[in-house]
Amino acid sequence: MTEAIYTVSQLNREARILLETQFPSLWVEGEISNFVAPGSGHWYFSLKDSNAQIRCACFKPFNKFIKFLPKDGTQVVVKGRISLYEGRGDFQLIVETLEEAGLGKLQRAFEELKQKLAKMGLFDAAHKKALPAFPKCIGVITSPTGAAIRDILNILKRRFPAVPVIIYPTLVQGETAAPTIVQSIETANKRKECDVLLLARGGGSLEDLWPFNEEMVAYAIHKSAIPLVTGIGHEIDFTIADFVADLRAPTPSAAAELVTPDKTELLNRLKHQRQRLMQLFKQQLQHLKQNLTWITKHLQQQHPKTRLREKAQLLDLMQMEITRCYYLVFNRNQNKLGELAAKLDALSPLATLQRGFSITTKANRVLFNTKEVSLGDKIQVKLHQGQLGCKVVEIEN
């Protein structure tokens, strides 16, 4: 059987495929040399140690995410995949991620722990505890001699001087810092002196802030029954503690502001509420005054004196009406009586007498006919003035 004969191109292609399929993505540490960045935007360099070197290519879609420009002599850690440049038959590493050596290790450890704890649910919002609106006591876990504690105390004094502060002296840098942080968190929870904790330190490098990226610190924060706020480093700094904490502030000073109400704002709110309360009080008082006035008037209207006065007035009116009616009837009757009197007077014998006539009576009976008397009878003649006693001496029929 005749053995297969490869062309150079075929051999290089098979070698490339074999390398790319057999070796997974891996991390390699070394020193950069022969770095070039042509106009295409790709980077080419060699990665070497004391005994060997390998060609590297970092193409534009990947290197645009790298935060620094590599240069010869820089110790780096790269993540990439093994390949072969077919045109020259060069064995090479296709770089996807490039970091400075010391920082890279810490950064990888940070990302790995972050992913682990995220999967365990330590960052979930369901575990975040609400901060007290008006803390009764604030616990500060930090170095007692650093700039961070001075900034925190100044902020607390300015914003809410009435709240007491307990400082739990803690190492915040170095290999023994993480256990000390854990111990301070546990101590604060055992004593139950505070209703909110502030874990803080000033800025620094990734190495300086590393105690706050330790797994033990993350678990201690997660287990804390007291709400905990972190204020670690500067705004751009993020630690594992920040993700686990109930609330993250960009700086220690900002953390102090987050855990306290603002005294000035509270006074302004109280002033506004007082003004609003006074306004409502005045409105209510005015309403009550109006009701009282109405009730007083109503009571006065229903008071016995008022009723008696009304009845007395009504009685006066009725009396006046009766008097008016009485006089009206009286005047009418008087006029009628006058008319009747005039008629009676016209028909009165006295009136007849006044005209020269007389009235003759016998035994007080008026005589109308001569036949009613006899000769010798005594009769009386009534004149207008006076009366005559007469004796009948002659009768003429």
Image (cartoon, rainbow, N blue to C red):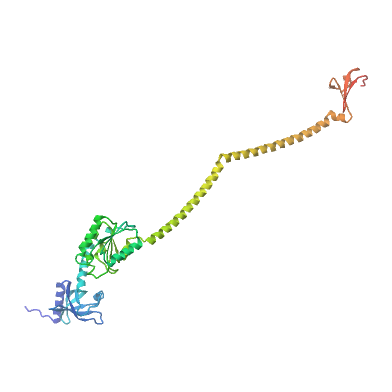
Front one among 300 and 40 = 300
From the top left corner, tell me how far across and down residue 42 is, in percent: 23, 79
Quadrant the N terminus occupies: bottom left
Position of 44 relative to 367 (above/below): below
From the top left corner, tell me how far across and down residue 247 is, in percent: 29, 62
Query: Residue at left 55%, top 43%?
Result: 300
| Residue 5 left/right relative to 370 | left
| Residue 302 left/right relative to 191 | right
Q: Quadrant of residue 314?
A: top right
Q: Is residue 264 visible?
A: yes
Query: Residue at left 22%, top 65%?
Result: 211
Front one among 332 and 203 = 203
Position of 259 relative to 5 (above/below): above
Position of 393 relative to 57 (above/below): above
Query: Residue at left 25%, top 66%?
Result: 239
From the top left corner, tell me how far across and down residue 324 is, in percent: 69, 38
Q: Is residue 121 visible?
A: no
| Residue 34 left/right relative to 299 | left
Query: Residue at left 22%, top 61%?
Result: 182
Q: Quadrant of residue 255?
A: bottom left
Position of 32 relative to 212 (above/below): below
From the top left corner, tell me how far across and down residue 283 is, in percent: 48, 53
Quadrant the C terminus occupies: top right
Front one among 301 and 9 = 301
Front one among 387 and 158 = 158
Q: Quadrant of residue 260?
A: bottom left
